[in-house]
Every structure is written in C-alpha cells, then in structure tokens.
Image (cartoon, coloured by chain):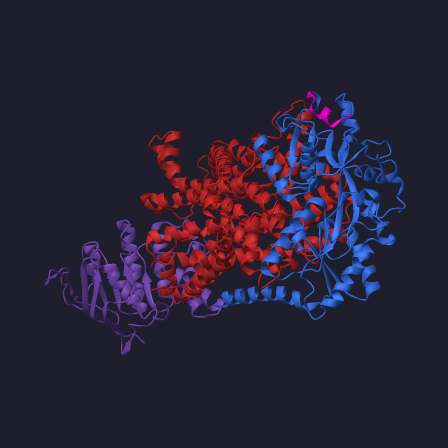
Amino acid sequence: MSLTSGFRWVATIWTLFFGAVCVGAPVSALFSRLHGGTLFDPDILSLVRVTVTQAGASAMIAAVIGLPLGLLIAAGGAAAGARSARAFFFNEMLLAIPFSVPTAVAASSWVLILGRNGWLARLGIPLDWSYSLKAVITAHVFFNAPWIALWVAQARDRIPEGRFEAALTLGASAFSRFRFLEWPAVKWSFFAAATQAFSFCVMSFALVLILGGGPPVQTLETAVYSRLRFGTLDVGGAAACAAWELLVTLLPWAAVLFFQARDPGRGARPARERARGVGSFGARSWLPGVAFFAAAVFLLPYLAIFPASWRSIDIVPWSKEVLPAVAVSVKIAVTSAFFVVLTALAAVMSLSSPRLHPAVTTALASLASLSGGISALVLGLGFWLAFGRWVDPFEGSFAAIVAIQLALFFNVAFRIFWPLAQEPRRNLLEAAATLGADPARAFFEIEWPRWRSSVAGAFALVAAASIGEVAAVSLFYSEKLVPLPLLIVRWSAQYRFEAAQSASALLFVLSSGTVASVFISFHWRGARD
Amino acid sequence: MTETLFVRGLRKPIADWVLTADFEVGPGERAAILGRSGIGKTTLLRIIAGLEPPGAGSIWLGKEDITNLPAERRRIGFVFQDQALFPTMNVLENVVFGLRMAGVPRAEREKTGLEWLERVRLSKHARARVATLSGGEAQRVAFARAWVMRPRVLLLDEPFSSLDEEIRGELRQILREAHAAWPVPMLMVSHDAKDIDELVTVPLRFQEEQGGSMRSVFRFLGESRRS
Amino acid sequence: MRPWLAAVLALLSVAGWGVRASLASPVLLTIYAYDSFAAPGGLGPEIIPKFEKKCGCQVRLLASGDGSQLISRLALDAERGKSGAQIVIGLDGPAAQRARGYIDSSVGGSGREELAPEVKAAGLPAGFVPYDFGYFAFMADRDQLKRQNLKLPARFSDLLRPEWRRNLILEDPRTSTPGLAFALYADTLGADWSKLRAQWLTLAPGWDGAYGLFLKAEAPLVWSYTTSQAYHQEHGDRSGRYQAVIFEEGQPIQVEAAALVKNSFNGPEGARQRALAQSFLEFLLSKEVQALLPTRNWMYPARKGVALPASFEGVPKPARVIRLEADPEKIKASLNQWTRTVQ
C-alpha cells in the first residue's frame, strides 16, 4: 500500500514547478546563447584548470581536516556520558555556524588576521602569502572543514556505542575500529560533504577576489563576474564559464551517488541509539573538552571583526537605517528558508518513490543538486533573459530574490534530507496504520519527530546563509528592499567604512544567532528523543 | 462484537512462489501458521492487516468484506516481529497510540493504557523511553499496544522468536489471559512447537504452485477446539 | 493536504507582492542610477524631492551597482525592446562610448557654455550631459609611509622601484571603473605590466574593497580620487594623514554624465515625459544641485564658478590632465593584452 502517494503527487508537481521556473528556464535561456567555440576557448579552459586546482586543493585539505575533526566531535559527545547529547549538539552548532558566515564578514576578518597590518603581522609573524592562492585556500578550508566535520560527526553519531564495545572486547585497535566501524558508517556522508565543499570553492568569488591578490588567482566564477559586470556584456562567455562550473560541480556529486548506490553496505544505518549515561569512553575525560575546542577553532577567525567594530558602534545609525534593513533581511531569509525547506522536502519525497528504478533515482538525485553549481550572477542573468519580457526585475522584486536564493540554497537542504529519506521507517508507519493512523497522521506522528530537527537545522542554515547573501539581492533590490548586506556595500561606497564594519559584525551576529538559536531550541529539547 | 475472520481464495505471487490460502478463524480461536522462511507467512498476515494488497481473493470479518478497506480503518491488531515501537514516544504513549488515533480523550486513554500496562506487568515503566526496555519488556509493550484498541482480529508475527524460554512462558501466559478477556480471532506465525501445541485449533491450507504442480507446504494442525 | 495548500497560497501571495508593487504607483519619470546616487546620504534622495516639487511629477530611482551595470541594463532593455527608464545617470567617458547606441543623441551635450573647461575638453559623445568630474590618483597614508621610511612617489615610474613592491592597492580593471582607468592610464604612460604586477598587494573587485583595505593600513597607497583627500579633511583628518599624490606625468580625468534613453518615450505620455526628462538634465546642471556635488559625490561640479567647500581647497590639482582611451574596441584589446601579461 502506498501510504503517501497523494502527497507524492503534489510533491512531484511542486518540484517540477520549482525546477522549471527557478532553474530550468533561466539556465536554458542562458545556454541558448552558448556557442560551441567559446566553450573551448583556451582562456576559459585555463580558468577551468585554475578553478579545479584551487577548489580541489581547498576541498582536499578541508576533507583531511574535517574527517578526523568530525570523528573527534562525535567521540567527544559519546565520552561525555550523561551530558553526551548536549555536548554533541553544542559542538554540532559550533561546526554549523561557519557555514553561515557572510562573505563580507569572512573577507574582512581574514584581512584583519592575515593581512600585512593584521594580528599575525603585529605579533611578529608577517606572512608573505597574505594575498595569494594560499590565503584563499586558508579561508576556504576554515569555511569548509567544519562543514565536512559536521556531516562526519552526524554519521559517526549514528553508530551504536555497543558496537565499539563489541570491537573493544574483540581486541580491535583504534585504527581497526576506524576501518571497520567508523569509516563504513561515515564514508558516504564524508564524500557527499567533500563534494559539496568542492562546489562551494568553485562558486566562491568575493574571497578569491579580495584575498587572491588578483591574477593569476582567478576562477570561473570571477570570470563570470567580469564578463557580466564589465566589457560588452559577454553573455556567451559567461554562459561558457557557467557551463563549465555546472559540469565541474555536478560530476563529483554524481560520482558519489553512483558509487554509493552500488555499495552493498549503504543501507545498514542503525537507528540512533547513543549509549547515554554509559559513557563507554568515559575514561578519557579530556575528550569532550578537546572536541569543544576543536570545533570552536574554526569560529575564532571571524571573532576578529568584533574588536574592530566596537570602536565605531556609536556612529552607526542603528534605528534609522540598520533596523529597516534588518527587517528586510529577516523577511527575505524567512521566506527563502521556508521555500527552500518546502521544496527540498517535496523533491526528496517525490524522488523516494519506490516505483522509480534505483538508477533513475540516483540520476535524479544528482540532478537535484544541479542548482548548487550555478552562481547567483548567472541565475540572475538567466532570470532576466527568461522572464524579462513579462516582469521587470529592475524594479526590485522580492519574489525574484527569493526565487534565486531558492535555487542557490536548495541543494543544501536537499542533501540534508536525502539520507533521511533513504532510511524510512516503513515498519513504524505500518504499525501506526494497524493502530488506526491515516497516512497523514502516521507521517506527522511517526516520521515528523525524526525529521523535525533536520528540517529546523536546514531552515536555520538556509536562513542564516540568506541573511548574508548579497549576489541575488544586489541584482533585484530596490529602494524599498535594501537588506543589511546591501546596506553594508552601500556604506562602503560612501566612505562609511567604519559603520559598514559595525554593521558586518551585526550581520555575523544575526546569521550565527539564527543557527545557534534554532540548534539550541530544537536540539536541546530534542536531545531527549 | 466478535466476528469470524474469513480468508477466501487468496492467491498472491511472492518472488517465485504463489501463496494460496483459504481458511477461517472464529472468535476466541487461536491459529498458527508454520513453514520455512520466505514462504509468505508474514505476507499473509500483512495482507489480512491491509498492509499489502491481496493478489486475488477476499478477506471478510463476519459479514463485512474488508478486502479494500485501508489498514487504518480495519482495527486489526498487529504485533510485529521487531515490535516496531515508536522510539520518539515513551511506553505509555506507545500503548495508547491507537486510542489517540481513535479520538479517545487523554484522561480516559491513559487510564486504559495504565490498566493494560498493569496487565502486562509494566506499570512502573509507563514513562520510560522504549529504547531502555529489554526484549521481553518491549514485546509486552507491543502486546499491550495491539490489545488496547480492542482489535477485531489479532495478528502476531513470531512474537517470541528472540526471547528466552522463561520469558516466553510468561508472555504466553499474558497472551492467554488477554485473549480470554477479549476473545477475538487470533493468528500467529511461529516456529516453536510449544506455541503450536498450546494454541493451534484451526486447520489451514497453504499451497505453493511450482511448475504447475500443487503440493502442500504447511502441515495440517489438528482440529480440536480448545477455547 | 493543508500544509501544501498553505505553501501554494504563500507562494502565490509572494508572487502577488511583486505584481502589486509594480502596479501601485503611477510613475512618470524613471531614472537608472548608480547605487551611491540613489542610496540614502547620496545625491539622489536630496535632489529628487526638490525636482518633484518643481515639476509636479513623480520620479523613481532604480539603482544598480556602477556604470558597467547600468550599461548591462541598457543592453538588456534594448534586447527586449522596452526600456524601463527614460534617464540614465552615472556613465563616465568609456562607459558613455559603450552606451552610445542606447542613448538619445539629439539632446545638448558637453559643449555647453556653463561647463568647466576640463569637462568640455573631455569630449563626451553627443547626447551626454556631464554633471561632475574628478581626477584619479593614488591616495597615500602618511603614517604608513613614515613607518616604512618611504617618500611620496613623484612620478608614475617611481612606482616600479623595489620599495613599492606589494605596497599598492589597485582595483581589478575587469570589474571596476577606477581599476580600468588605472590600466588605461598605465598604458598611456607606456608602463610595463610585467614589472608592475609585482608591485600591487591585491586587486580588489571594486573601489570600496580597495579603499577599505587601505584604511585598514594594508598598504600605503591606494588607487582612488584626489578628492578622497577632501573627504578625510571634512571628517576630522586634521593632521593630513591621508593625502592625494600627484604625478609629474599627469592624472587621468573622469567625467560623469547623464543622458536620455533612446526609444523610451513611447507611451501616451511620451512627449510630456521627454520634456520632463530634459528639464531634469538641466536641473542637474543648476547651481543648486552643482553646489551639493562636492560633499555628496566627492567630485568637482561640472559647472564652472560653483563655490567649493573649504576641504576641497587643499586638494592638489594635477599638473597635466590625461584623457584616457574611450574606444570600446581598443579598451577590449588592451584588457586582453593586460590579462595575458599578468596571468
């Protein structure tokens, strides 16, 4: 019996609608301008090479750090015994916050730390690489390593402690425990997160432009930027760069899904049953503390912005200019996050139809993260080309901003929900049916408690990222629709750098506060589940 | 109130088998299904419960044809092999879930739920998380959860398979008492001869079809009616 | 079903906001403006209400980034055959050359009597009405110069000396107007980019990024405008820490202009709109508006004889004014050359 076929139809229609309007139409409008020649233009090919090198190096280093960090965080949570759930969720929160750091804040912070007049330099450690590829990679690693660690930690947390105890009684060394217990349980989360980190680095552009020190450190994304922002609006060239970006970001993710589908062990996900109050590794009392510090390290750089903004706190027109901008930001963030979560849930639901062949599911799931490989700039132009005849995006469009952010952040939520949908508790839903629960009620009573914290987490991450997002916003704002990141850009253009700095600090507080408050309210309470 | 369960002309292909069944279980009767793994015992229970469509044939409760009734409207109690307790709810919440779905007010359903927990000797665990229960305790919660909504039929899928002998004895006792108090048709999948000897009353006929020849897979289990 | 229904309704209402917003106000005159013109504290919010009062009409500002983005808008508008605005404001020399095709060239241009001689000499294409100008120059941070024991460079060629290695903050010529001006300036002076590329600390994506780094004391020199000095004077820099640097070779001039958008007066009110739009261009050149320019845009007024604030008096005037290449094809070629050299 198909418990949810009605829902699934609605979900499928919604997903197709989103795909067509927010991604399909803009992208095909743009790609219709693509000429074969530009695609293999040697200049663009060399950009592809540089981009893949930069993003590959960044993602690789982030992965090498993120994997042990994630295992450490999870082990630290387990070792905290009775306090394990809280300790774990608190560390998870610390790992989630860097994802939401607005690029304006990140760029500013890194300059304050790594710059020639930065903290390190003043401490007597001058860096001759403060504006180079190394600086870009450093910033990217700090951004991505916690993201990978978060995914690894969550996957590691699903391994029942009993298995570790069993392994210990069988004389397994730490390495054997990693090889036979942890690695099989975390590897697909790890690969998925690493490919996503790779995409983030391909898409990154403000950090590359500011910290890279100019050519030759440039990427496809900065090339898109210069082709659209300057010269004779080179739509063909931008489309060629965008096509390469899509290809480069989509391939690794498709590969992960392909190999994961062929892995016989992938379905073996035990239910969450952390040994609470037992603390099998409780003997190592230093673990929780170390885990906490390891998670916190990745937040430290961004704190640099606070002392710098404290000085100018009184020159900021808080109530006159900042407050209205915050209101606009919050409105955009909440709406975007709502639709992102809704759409990702719909997509996950329609893709987990049992009637689909596994290969088709894999293909569609790879396609679902297509939008993660398109830059806001490209989407914005695509929107214009596709819909400019009917609506005027230059008049400032809340709907267009939300639609672009929907496309930008959709795949973040999708990737959070996808593993959950892969392990549905069908037996529980059936048990609920035999007890008289109709499909909708069975879903909300049985499935929803399991999804709740992930949905809240995805909502928080997207809302936080949306608060700091400036590309989509700067394409479709109007005087009545000026959110905080844009206000900061505007102030900088008017020499009001100090006020901009203070507003950036507020932006950081807002975005990290969004993540923190949702994590705390949901996980703290949900920890009893 | 209690009606006979009729399974009429059921034919359901499972992998390379065809499961056929045609039998009835009367009120207060206890029947068992035997057979080796993968033969469709669980499938038969699931078809009766409405969790899977029958290939051909019909299911009746008394004079009502329930073949096309959705599972949630059949009121057929099901004790799953892995219990399928809801991990996000405590013991009492699990037990009264069916009453909640039926719209029974909170105070009343908790009272009933506690009575049943008393009967399965788990009252002191009412607020415990289900993950903390032992195997036998979890099984008793599953019994109580299925019984508490006064089902029209009770189906049990290998309810004792993973428990030790002492606990099995205890659970059989609980089951007998409960069945005496609420004598509906009861159908159990089991491997254990003890279950069969004590419970079985109804002859069942199951056949597999292979290469056109029919042969009996399940043995007939005597015809004495005890209850 | 209800949550889904709610979601659909919510989406429809969101879409509805967009539609309603575009229907709500009957606008007579729309202006494409660069962002800081339209931003609070910029020139726009100050002069638009005055103009509206004068003309009895309604003016709407649509802001977007800088001059390059304005041209993108014009290009996209031309493509869809429907212009969203009647006036565009904030195009400089090279931008004006590129935008020529989208501009109504029948309106009076840069030869007007009341304009300052520098502006007249800049020779904008027909149809563009200049309203302000400035000189690109390096701004120096004297505290940093002192710390590094450096003397102000006197000539552009001094920048190639080893002591200026990684001591300049520039803007990327591909994404920024001042950045492009620097590249063309360097080309005009015959600079060797293969040597120059070792001298910059970073190429910021825009002027604001570069200037922000400069104020964080990342490097003692940043490519900006001579009038940046006036800004610091006006905002409490008594010691003269921030100073414009004038090179013997001369400084490039930037003239900013406004223009009427071609084929944008089609509606039933087209003729009235056109008259209003022309009067707005006149209004930009009025003494009233021109007097505001120095402290709003931090640029010189295009009209001659307008009194300047005291902070502008200390700003050095360039020894020679350099007119930069404005031909889009030549600019493109030299940018390509630049990319190949610095790559």
Q: How many marks?
A: 0
As for residue B60 lying within the magenta part, the answer is no
Q: Which chain is red?
A: A
Above or below — where is A258 with respect to C188? Answer: below
User: Where the N terminus of chain A falls, by quadrant?
Assistant: bottom left
Q: Which percent across, then down, holds residue A430?
A: 36, 61
Q: Position of residue C309 (x, y in %)?
A: 88, 43
The answer to which quarter of the image holds residue A138 is top right
Residue C156: in magenta span: yes
Residue A41, given in percent of the width and then of the height, sits at: 48, 40
Q: Toward which corner of the image does residue C17 lie, by quadrant?
A: bottom right
- Check the image and report above or below for C54 versus A420: below
Residue A275 to residue A425: above or below: above
- Main SS, magenta region, reads helix
Q: Which one is nearer the viewer's eye here, C89 or A269?
A: C89
In percent of the image, x 29 and y 56: which residue is there?
A: B159
What is the span of residues highlighted in magenta in the rendered image? C154-162
Left or right of residue A405, residue B172 in this image: left
Q: Is residue C19 above or below residue A114?
A: below
- Image-based side of B52 in relation to A453, left or right: left
* Chain (purple): B
| Residue A476 coordinates in the image, percent (x, y) | 63, 55
Asked whether residue C285 is in view, the answer is: yes
| Res. A159 visible in picture | no
| Colour for chain C in the figure | blue
Q: Residue furthest left?
A: B213
> Does residue C318 appear to the left or right of A134 in the view shown?
right
Q: Residue furthest bottom?
A: B63
